[in-house]
Image (spheres, rainbow, N blue to C red):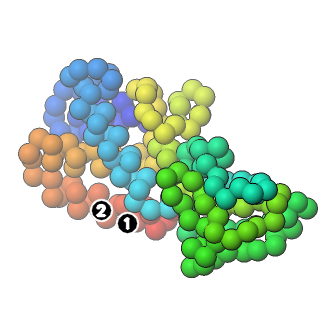
Amino acid sequence: MKTILEICQEVADIAGVTRPTNLFSQPDCKWLELIRNELVSLRDYGEWRDTVRQGYFTIKTGCKRYLIDDFAPDFNLLSNSTIFIKDKQERIIKAIIPENREKYFKIKSGYFILKNKLPDGAKVIFQYRSTCVAWDYDSFEEKTVLDKNTDVPIFDEYLVKLGVLWRYELYKGIDFNEDYSEYKRELIKRFAIN
């Protein structure tokens, strides 16, 4: 369980450069950009178990548009899983497979927009990929934005370290092909395990 600062310090040791001491101040803020880019890249790579959440909203009379921030503020992408519609007694009344979603709703400009009428009071239950990339070292609160040196990535620390290393080498104009190849191998392996 290494923090973002500790990971960047390890990469600096490997690269043979001065260790950063504070990612949020000069001259170390370039390290923050590198690790932030790596975490966002990992988040967007695929459906990691640690980023999948469940959300729901309740159908209101006459309402077709539901602001996603109201019920899933960390929403990134809809998961590739079945969406369930439950009645007021919590019984499943419809299961919408991914291939049929466009018949029932669309997501546009931060809204779920219904295309077909659903019963008032029904719950639309879905899984989504979160925008969270780290958690707070002290409170374990999930975070979508890095704001402390002690933030801990939600992804495998070795994979994050490899990602920051090849990004650092690219930034410095150093040959990064070998480290990038190792990173890609580890990424494929760890994503398959996840």
Q: Quick one: 174 or 89, which is closer to the camera?
A: 89
Q: Percent position (x, y) of residue 127? A: 62, 60
Residue at position x 17%, y 58% from top?
Answer: 178
The quarter of the picture where residue 123 lies is bottom right
Task: Tell me what residue is drawn at x 54 percent, y 60 percent.
Answer: 107
Q: Nearer the viewer, residue 123 or 61?
A: 61
Residue at x-position 46% and y-position 49%: 155
Residue 180: x and y in percent read 22, 57
Q: Tell me the number on the disc at residue 184.
A: 2
* Residue 168: quarter of image: top left
The secondary element bearing badge 2 is classed as helix
- Horizontal relation, residue 161 to residue 125: left or right: left
Residue 147 visible here: yes
Examine the rendered structure and indicate whether residue 19 appears above or below residue 44: above
> Separation of disc 1 and disc 2 at Cα?
6 Å
Residue 139 lies left or right of residue 183; in this view the side is right
Give the labeled residue for mark 1: 188
- Whether 147 is drawn above or below 52: the answer is above
The answer to whether residue 72 is seen in the rendering is no
Amino acid residing under circle 1:
Ile
* Residue situated in front as seen by the camera: 14 or 149: 149
- In the rendered image, residue 102, in percent from the top left (x then y), is placed at 57, 73
Residue for point 57% across, 53% down: 111
| Amino acid beneath label 2 | Lys
Asked if labels 2 and 1 touch by Cβ distance under 8 angstroms, the answer is yes
Question: What SS does tag 1 mark?
Answer: helix
Q: In this view, does 21 lie above or below 55?
A: above
